[in-house]
Image (cartoon, rainbow, N blue to C red):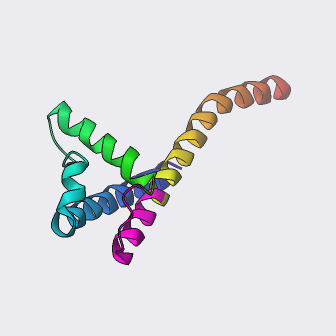
Amino acid sequence: MLITGLINNSKYLLALRKLINYLKENHPEIYKSLGEPKIISAAPKDAFGTLKFVRAFLRSSYYDVEDPQLENMKSTTAKLLKRGYILFAVAVMWFFTFPIFFFIAVKLAG
């Protein structure tokens, strides 16, 4: 589960970087309207810009552009993000339920 999560998150970050760079080079007006998001930055302002990008661009069709490559990258990045949410939720559920089942198994065995 941990390895799957790491692989998915790595793919997501690579896809997000590719999408942001594509927007920056081919659709600068959209890139600027989304707050010029950056993946890695020490400034909190940049982190909030990236969150705005994820919320506004990946989850909506507000910025519909007739660019099939952009739509494909947007779809791939959104799918990887959703998969990451699911993996995180499963990991949290497993984290909380595994000790309970282990305790029950020990009680039943003893």
Taking 107 as reference, is 35 left or right? left
Taking 65 as reference, is 102 left or right? right
**In the image, what residue occupies the spot 68% across and 31% down?**
97
Q: Quadrant of residue 68?
A: bottom left
**In the image, what residue occupies the spot 19% across and 58% down?**
29
Residue 77 among those drawn in magenta: yes
Looking at the rendered structure, the number of numbered marks drawn on it comes to 0
Taking 103 as reference, is 109 left or right? right
Residue 75 among those drawn in magenta: yes
Q: Main secondary structure of the magenta part?
A: helix
Q: Residue furthest bottom?
A: 68
Return the x and y of residue 104 as percentages of the image width and height: 78, 26
**In the image, what residue occupies the spot 18% across and 52% down?**
32
Along the viewing direction, whichever of 78 and 7 lies nearer the viewer: 78
Along the viewing direction, whichever of 33 and 14 lies nearer the viewer: 33
Residue 26 versus residue 24 in the image, above or below? below
Along the viewing direction, whichever of 107 and 89 lies nearer the viewer: 89
Locate the C terminus and report the quarter of the image it occupies: top right
- The residue stretch that appears in magenta: 62-78
Taking 38 as reference, is 58 left or right? right
Residue 39 versus residue 61 in the image, above or below? above
**In the image, what residue occupies the spot 62% across and 28% down?**
96
Return the x and y of residue 43 as percentages of the image width and height: 14, 34
Return the x and y of residue 37 as percentages of the image width and height: 22, 48
Q: Quadrant of residue 78?
A: bottom left
Residue 107 versus residue 74 in the image, above or below? above
Q: Residue furthest right?
A: 108
